[in-house]
Amino acid sequence: MRPTFIAGVVVRELAPHADERGRFTEIYREAWNTCPPNLQWNCVCSNARVLRGVHVHAVHHDYLFVAAGTLVLGLHDIRPESATRASSEMIVIEAEKPLGIAIPPGVCHGFYFPIPSVHVYAVSEYWNAKDELGCRFDSPELGLDWPDREPLLSERDMKAGDYAQMCQKYAVASEQSGSGETR
Amino acid sequence: MRPTFIAGVVVRELAPHADERGRFTEIYREAWNTCPPNLQWNCVCSNARVLRGVHVHAVHHDYLFVAAGTLVLGLHDIRPESATRASSEMIVIEAEKPLGIAIPPGVCHGFYFPIPSVHVYAVSEYWNAKDELGCRFDSPELGLDWPDREPLLSERDMKAGDYAQMCQKYAVASEQSGSGETR
């Protein structure tokens, strides 16, 4: 494990085995207890200069792995009762030095890809539009100094609301789900 | 689902969502019931002309997905009581047309990569050397017409025994595990 600033985020250094054929990496074992059991796995290919996010969830946990390329991961804690509330952190992940990263509910995350990249991630709940909250990646309150001021965004991320709106929606969703940051 | 010749092999056509940022694909949902619950996920990068296999397991199921490149998947059934015993099948999988493939115990599998490729796979049991059986990829009984006669192999796969030895070891392991082909 590698320490992070943000409480509940788990960064696990993985151990790739390389030989003349290529590289083998165990990316997840249930017994590692890095996150709750995963119901679904997804694979995402991203072009250079794409930014996905910033997103946050009230219910589901994410677990992610970079299979190819480079991910600049921005994290920010909006859980009202968290010891690291309002903390931000950036982690650069290169496929050649693999990490497994677990992100709990209430920790906002944005993914920036400086080069074409592939990442795989698992979720502890099936996709639910109600659990997809977010704000503009360049909201100053996030405290995230992205390496690109004009990244390629989806329409949804481009038109996302501001930080205060996100925090308010998160508080409501968190209360409705009965989870809060203690989940 | 797509039919296969070999009983118990599941080939699921996945639905990638492409946009200007790249491509998103759901690669696995527990509710699809394509395979037993997975305890472990692995990621494998392979150079061009690598062949991994031929392998077979008495206990664990595999579920695989090609994230980048091309996989030529060779399958062959050695389950004594299977309706498709001794049948062989080759499936070419390109990352751009993604499939999720579940391979049950007793179905031999070899992976050939004509170009640099990345695949992700899940297993229903943690790695156990005793459940790793196999034979030479070019054993004639496999009935697999590989596109490359001199692929790059690991030392283990290079020195693997013959088909008859594999079948015998499988029968013993299958009986010991109490699973057999009905598992």
Image (cartoon, coloured by chain):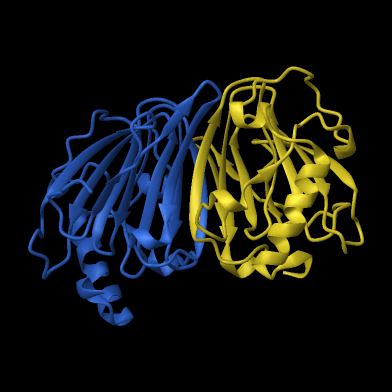
Chain colours: A yellow, B blue
Q: Position of residue A54 (x, y in %)?
A: 72, 38
Q: Nearer the viewer, residue A130 or A146?
A: A130
Q: Position of residue B147 (x, y in %)?
A: 24, 28
- Residue A119 lies in what quarter of the image? top right
Q: Residue at 67% of width from left, 26% of height from top?
A: A158
A64 vs B89, left or right, is right
Q: Residue at 85% of width from left, 38% of height from top?
A: A142
Q: Is residue A123 something that shows in the picture?
A: yes
- Residue A93 lies in what quarter of the image? top right
B181 vs B83, left or right, is right
Q: Quadrant of the C terminus of chain B?
A: bottom left
Relative height, residue B33 to residue A18 (above, below): below
Q: Is residue A33 something that shows in the picture?
A: no
Q: Nearer the viewer, residue A123 or B37?
A: A123
Residue closest to the far left: B83
Residue closest to the far top: A150
Q: Residue at 28% of width from left, 61% of height from top?
A: B104
Q: Position of residue A1 (x, y in %)?
A: 77, 58
Q: Position of residue B28 (x, y in %)?
A: 42, 52
- Count the numbered circles shown: 0
Relative height, residue A26 to residue A89 (above, below): below
Q: Nearer the viewer, residue B134 or B19?
A: B19
